[in-house]
Amino acid sequence: MDAPAPLRDCQAWKDAGLPLSTASNEACKLFDATLTQYVKWTNDKSLGGIEGCLSKLKTADPNFAMGHAISNGLVLIGTGSSVRLDRELDLAVKTMVDIAQAQPLTRREQLHVSAVETFAKGNFSRACELWEQILWDHPTDMLALKFSHDAYFYLGYQEQMRDSVARIYPFWTPSIPLSSYVKGIYSFGLMETNFYDKAEKLAKEALSINPTDAWSVHTIAHIHEMKAEIKDGLEFMQRSETHWKDCDMLACHNYWHWALYLIEKVLPSLKASGAMLDVVDSCSMLYRLQMEGVSVGERWQDILPVTQKHSRDHILLFNDAHFLMASLGARDPQTTQEILTTLQDASEAPGENCQHLLAREVGLPLCQALVEAESGNPDRVVELLLPIRYRVLQLGGSNAQRDVFNQLLIHAALECTSGVHKNVARSLLMERDALKPNSPLTQRLIRKAAAVHLLQIQGEEHRERGCWGPSPPATSIGCGDPGQAPASSCWSCPVIESGTRRPSDHRLGTSTTKPAAVFRRPC
């Protein structure tokens, strides 16, 4: 493992080509300490944590513009507060701008201040343009790199997230502090754009230098998830846990990738941190378990107090959807209505806020689909989600995080009663299987689809013969139910079989495995 680099003073920042407009060496070192902890996803107790460093930084030089930029930027990038509702944050951003205008700053510093101010207004894409302007001339400016990377993530701009790092990666030589972490940042963008082999290679290089690089661990966890390498993923997370579990700003999210096995580790971590990433992960995990037919008990009630205070934030539509999961799961109609009403209001007066502009066409239909799912209206869920499924990417988050919405659409399609939607589930599952073969989740959903189809056929035939009344509801056989029907080719899906399954053979029509027998249909 690399020894930690000494914190940089005024001269060191100048030597790096990144001069800071302050005469305080202490302020410069505290700026470096804050930046380092942000990149490493950890609050270093020996440094006093990020909040401790920022507090001492402002004391060391109250007029240090870049100190204000990193302080406000970190609050905003956390998406837990907005200048629209938080007066203290609004004042802090205005103070930052006033301080910047009252002194001669470098162009780089001016762009940093402008980018944070623009991000505060909700114009994330314009803020990214400003950070990119910095990186054109200063490719080793880690703050611009990290802020733009996170903002691209929120925007769902996967190619930009990858390419913004690709452009500057050659400039990061091993002698530059934090250079190994750039490998991990780059690897995540590569992974999100399906360059799995290159992403894994870079992430492993980063971990060979710093095994505690939680973001590189996170990339590899995603790769195993996207390639349905469940056993390898579990072994990797277990093997590496001691290295990343103390990275408090990302540990809960890494445990989320382990969530089905470690549910009891996630909720205590959420309550301890309250970080927005941990909040949405916990909501997503419970919602996925619920869709799988797992009873989550009173856990929605445990999460609701954390999400409830953000009901009016509307900083990210991705967050809003997860807050809604919590209020619906906890059966709190008042909070549910508050989220929907205030989001509707925000969409009607969006200004330059990119999320509010997107709310009408994507955010509100998605939220309404969650409500309809809770109300037992699967056909309406499909009507709302199907037209926007390719636009959900614009909400941000990773492919793995957004998959909860894909799963919602498939579950709803499986329960549809309308003839218009009878083949939607089949089509979605064939698509999913083609993109992610051998996924246990997809196989469970395929088995459920076959069982639902056979129950419907039984009901139709029995009614025709006058044997019994309506067919059992489609929900009577849950996903993964031990009593589920054997799969059958009568569902007209070439990937449905109960024996040995060879996805590529089935899709090519060259399978040598015989279809399983369908249910006997006694009258």
Image (cartoon, rainbow, N blue to C red):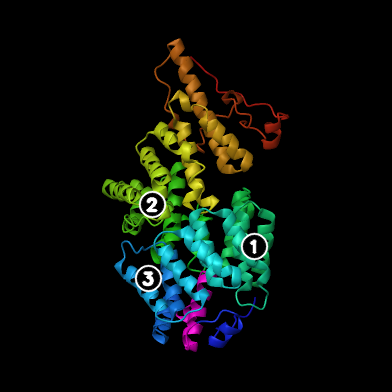
Q: CA distance from mark 2 to mark 3?
A: 21 Å
Quick one: SS at disc 2? helix
Q: Residue at x 50, y 88 (%)?
A: 25
For label 3, the crowd category at 10 Å Cα-Cα, with few meaning under 14, some 14 to 19 and many 20 or more, is many
Locate residue 55: give its quadrant: bottom left
Task: Give the residue type at disc 2.
Answer: His
Locate residue 75: give its quadrant: bottom left
**In the image, residue 485 lies at what x, y percent?**
53, 29
Residue 93 bears which disc, if any? 3
Q: Residue at x 47, y 74 (%)?
A: 110
For label 1, the crowd category at 10 Å Cα-Cα, with few meaning under 14, some 14 to 19 and many 20 or more, is some
Say whether residue 36 is magenta: yes
Q: Residue at x 71, y 31 (%)?
A: 508
List the single residue furthest toward the top: 465
What residue is disc 2 on? 356
Residue 166 bears which disc, if any? 1
Q: CA distance from mark 2 to mark 1?
A: 30 Å
Q: Nearer the viewer, residue 78 or 414?
A: 78
Q: Nearer the viewer, residue 222 or 358?
A: 358
Quick one: SS at disc 3? helix
Quick one: SS at disc 1? helix
Q: CA distance from mark 3 to mark 1?
A: 31 Å
Q: Main secondary structure of the magenta part?
A: helix
**In the image, residue 290 lies at what x, y percent?**
43, 44
Task: Give the residue type at disc 1.
Answer: Ala
